[in-house]
Image: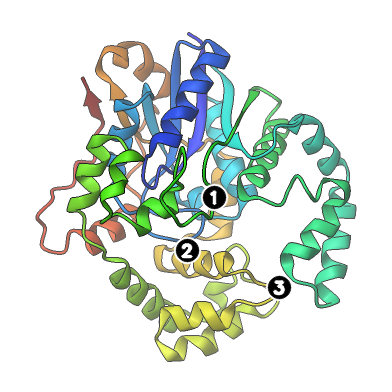
Amino acid sequence: MNISAIICEFNPFHNGHAYLLEQVRRQTQCDAVLCIMSGSFTQRGEMCILDKYRRARHAVLNGADAVIELPAHFAVAPAEIFADGAVCILSRIPSVNFLGFGCEIITDFDAVAAELLDESGKFRKILRERLDAGEGYAAAYAAAVGRHSELLNTPNNILAVEYAKANIRHGRKLTLCPVERKGAGYHGRELGGQFASARAIRENKESEALKDFVPQEVLSDLVRCEDRSQRFKQLAADALFFADAERLKRIYGCTEGLENRLKKLSASGDYDEIILQGTGKRYPASRIRRILAANLLGLFKDDAERLLQGAPSARVLAVRKDMADALLPLISPSAPPPEDAGYAVWRYINYPSGEENVREKTVFIE
């Protein structure tokens, strides 16, 4: 069997994602498309809008053959660890030969990744010097990557290079399949054009126009879901208040005294104020959000590194019923991992009255 993989969040699944699945299948002529998807929280430290089993179902109904879960230790982590964890898992699954992804600019990502890996020491030195000189992180990062700065000024292209770097580290087992992103940009907040961004869909889920940008089953789930983000924010702020500096230092990106700064800010008890005051030239808001989410969920750097050194496995969330016999022997771990803390917290926030029963099992899609 020839399998193409896609690393994703699908928060929520939309027509642009369906286009990506279609293009990867067409370009690779694969027998199956496998998605490895963040479960309950995203790489930016935000809570997913819908249950991971529902999002996996949406993907299988709209072009994927199976969806497995990217463990939270990798899903809520900097781009390098997000990519490394996903590629590590995919490289261990038999018959996964391609890695598809969306990007703003198509280039030879293998060559760029190889160059950046060769110059990793130089990259870190320039980045440190620029940060110490008071430059913002984005500007310092652009200076460190040198002639590739224009290429690496969007989240999707940064992830594309991290996928390529991870693939090199894991033996170049996957052939990269970049697909040019169509429609709104990653940060777009308006519904319009050919495809809308996931952010625009989340922020406009009450809009009548939403039906033009998501499949019907996604629309049905979105209009029924309640916004419980404030509940998450309060839990994250409270968890920060009760954490000590040593605990925070175990989280990716919480270094160089940032742990002490966040501890002082935690006294306000206000999540949005902590993000606002914690963000600066050196620390983008996405890093602060990610640290708060990782602290709440107990996701630590040393644990993630142990997983990478071992053989991390991924829970199967959904699979096409007619592909189950062919795919499950390949993608199912010998010992299914337990549900991680991320899903327990997500359910506590979103199903406070217990009106939904946890499934904790693969969903088979007709």
Which three-letter amino acid code belongs to the residue tagged 1? Answer: Tyr
Tag count: 3
Name the residue rendered at 58%, 26% in the picture: 99
Q: Nearer the viewer, residue 250 or 224?
A: 224
Tell me the tag on residue 282: 3
Answer whether labels 2 and 3 touch (C-beta < 8 Å): no
Q: Compared to 223, does 324 lie above or below?
A: above
Name the residue rendered at 51%, 36% in the picture: 7
Residue 94 seen in this snapshot: no
State how the image is colored.
Answer: rainbow
Which three-letter amino acid code belongs to the residue tagged 3? Answer: Arg
N-term mark: 3 or 1: 1
Q: Compared to 29, does 257 lie above or below?
A: below
Marks 2 and 3, how far apart at CA: 19 Å
Which three-letter amino acid code belongs to the residue tagged 2? Answer: Ala
Q: Nearer the viewer, mark 2 or mark 3?
A: 3
Please give the residue where the numbered disc 2 appears in the rendered image.
294
Please indicate whether residue 29 sits to the left or right of residue 122 in the image. left
- Picture coordinates of residue 334 (x, y %)? 38, 27
Marks 3 and 1, how far apart at CA: 22 Å
Q: Compared to 277, does 252 lie above or below?
A: above
Name the residue rendered at 46%, 47% in the picture: 197
Q: Nearer the viewer, mark 3 or mark 1?
A: 1
- Picture coordinates of residue 221 (x, y %)? 21, 45
Marks 1 and 2, how far apart at CA: 23 Å
Q: Helix, strand or loop at disc 3?
A: loop
Q: Quadrant of residue 134?
A: bottom right
Please give the residue where the numbered disc 1 appears in the rendered image.
186
Q: Nearer the viewer, residue 39 or 216?
A: 216
